[in-house]
Amino acid sequence: MSACLIAPSILSADFARLGAEVDAVLQAGADWVHFDVMDNHYVPNLTIGPMVCEALRRHGVTAPIDVHLMVKPVDRIVPDFAQAGATYISFHPEASEHVHRTIQLIRSHGCRPGLVLNPATPVEVLDYLLDELDLVLLMSVNPGFGGQAFIPSALDKLRRVRERIAASGRDIRLEIDGGVKPDNIGAIAAAGADTFVAGSAIFNAPDYAAVIAKMRAEVAAARSANA
Ligand SMILES: O=C(CO)[C@@H](O)[C@H](O)COP(=O)(O)O
């Protein structure tokens, strides 16, 4: 099993102090910065774009930036995010006319491509695509807002995607996003996730290091119970 990675979603950060917030979660032990891009079209909310990603790089952030595009169309913003310093760029298949082409576009710009499955998107959407992907992101809430409750059917979906990744023989991260908390992250890890996005659970906590450490401990306990 791949290393457990914790990716705080900056959607729940204090945007007035974004650089300091990102520094704080990374110093507290986070691995990635999860960067939620919403366009008020594909999803009913509006957030941040490539200029903010670039500003974080200029601020000195060297950790992987995990860009989750909740935008439609996708392709025209990909080069801008690559230029801005994105590491992973993930998108929703429903938002792209030509999913395979968008994946190739992301890779051709030097980034790692990921595909995002909404709660009602079947796992079969991965057919013919897993060989091209570096990451699969399963949404355990409907995209658009932080602070929603985890949808339990995501656990079965994680197991099914984990089986497909194992069968592919490729090193693909399996990321989960939405309602991830210290009290459910163990079950989520046991179902097969290795990369954990958490927004409100981390940024609403008084002590970022303590909540990240608690999440890692829960993942480690679940993995050793399943070994
Ligand atoms: O992409 C999204 C929502 O669309 C997520 O990244 C949320 O921002 C996660 O927030 P929490 O559920 O962890 O509060």
Image (spheres, helix red, strand yellow):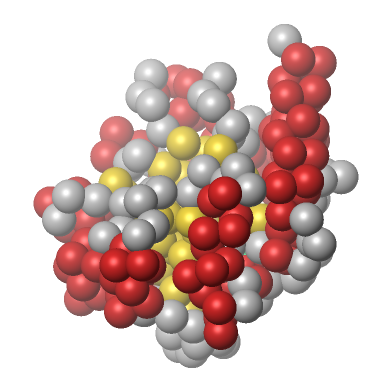
| Viewer can see residue 27 | yes
Q: In this view, does 86 lie above or below 3?
A: below
Quarter of the picture for ligand 1?
bottom right
Look at the image and tell me in which quarter the C terminus lies: top right
**Point 58% across, 67% down: residue:** 21
Q: Is residue 63 above or below residue 3?
A: below
Relative horizontal placement of residue 139, taking residue 86 as reference (left or right): right
**Point 77% across, 48% down: residue:** 211
Relative horizontal placement of residue 195, taking residue 113 as reference (left or right): right
Residue 175: image quadrant is top right
Q: Where is residue 85 in the image (x, y as percent from the top left)?
A: 26, 60
**Point 61% across, 36% down: residue:** 193
152 vs 198, nearest the viewer:
198
18 vs 122, nearest the viewer:
18
Q: Where is residue 195 in the image (x, y as percent from the top left)?
A: 56, 40
Q: Which residue lies furthest to the top in this view?
A: 227
Q: Is residue 165 above or below residue 157?
A: above
202 vs 189, nearest the viewer:
202
Q: Which residue lies furthest to the left in this view?
A: 108
| Viewer can see residue 70 | no
Q: Position of residue 2 (x, y in %)?
A: 52, 24
**Point 87% across, 45% down: residue:** 183
Q: Which residue lies furthest to the right in this view?
A: 183
170 vs 57, nearest the viewer:
57
Look at the image and tell me in which quarter the N terminus lies: top right
Residue 99: image quadrant is bottom left
Relative horizontal placement of residue 138, taking residue 156 as reference (left or right): left
Residue 201: image quadrant is bottom right
Relative horizontal placement of residue 141, taking residue 87 as reference (left or right): right
Q: How many labels does the image show?
A: 0
